[in-house]
Amino acid sequence: MIQAALRLVHLSSPQPGALADFYQATYDMRVETHDEYHRCHAPGRELWFSAGPANQLGHALFRLHDSGSWQAFQARTATLARASTDLPALPAETLVFADPDDNRIGFAPPAAAAPQGGNPTEAPPAVLQHFALRTPQLEDMLAFYRDALGFVVSDLVQTDAGELTAAFLRTDTLHHSLALFRAPFSCFDHQSFETADWHALKVWADRTGRRRTPIVWGIGRHGPGDDVFFMVRDPDDNLAEISAEIEVCRPGRATGLWPHEEWTLNQWGKAILRS
């Protein structure tokens, strides 16, 4: 494993200010503006929004856990083509690559430890843990993240006929930091904040309820990852997830294979199938 964790997701939107307001209120985040960018942040979670098409990933940023992992990742990707970016949040040393759908994926060296302040209000801790993409070229996307960048495949989903429909990939011991779903077109699917436990998930659900933000999927339990979760939709119709108790993968864990059915994505009820 490359030993990295997701630290930032940047989305384009025809209404970036509305998205920033939504995440500020729903997910207890502060908002700052940097030229045309809106930055939403709280301890452990950071989202950026800028003007552009809806439902598209501008960038995702991973940070390597330690200097040895950073050096190994630099060596692994030394021959890969770099992609350009102008997002001001990215450290100068960031290596940026474009995946087969032209999403920009950045990797940065470990950051110096900094003291973290408390949450802005009363919400429990929640850390930006993974994101998901929809793609019409799932095999090419899987090969890029697995073979070129070094992500590890935790679980695959396929139809009875053997067609691959989803892949869950990890960059450290947590079950997935990226999920890929087969779909007719390329777009952003969701980001997920990981909270501490079942009780904290309930507190987050109560918070969304008080704001009259409807839960559109869940509360449920994913098969791949074994996490409990719920999802809402933001003003651009992106899914936004709170999850808890995601699987910690043991060394040498074999890749799981799941059937393409609702039960795989939600063992407690209905599911959103992307294909």
Image: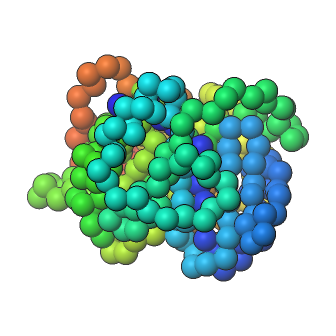
Q: Residue at left 24%, top 52%?
A: 143
The front one of 120 and 162 is 120
Please indicate whether residue 201 sits to the left or right of residue 217 in the image: right
Residue 151 quadrant: top left
Apparent side of residue 9 relative to residue 273 in the rendered image (left or right): right
Name the quarter where the N terminus is drawn: top left
* Residue 134 in view of the camera: no
Q: Residue at x 54, y 37 (%)?
A: 109
2 up-or-down from 8: above or below: above
Residue at x 67%, y 76% (from the top left corner): 51
Residue 204 drawn at (x, y percent) = 72, 42
Q: In which quarter of the image is residue 203?
A: top right
Residue 39 percent location from the top left of the image: 75, 58
Total tally of numbered discs in the picture: 0
Name the one closer to the observer, 143 or 207: 143
Give the position of the C terminus as an image quadrant: bottom left
Q: In this view, does 48 lie to the left or right of 95?
A: right
Q: Residue at x 43, y 47 (%)?
A: 178
Above or below, comparing residue 152 to residue 207 in the picture: above
User: Which is more toward the observer, 268 or 192?
Assistant: 192
**Percent x, y of residue 98:** 40, 62
Extreme residue toward the left, this view: 161
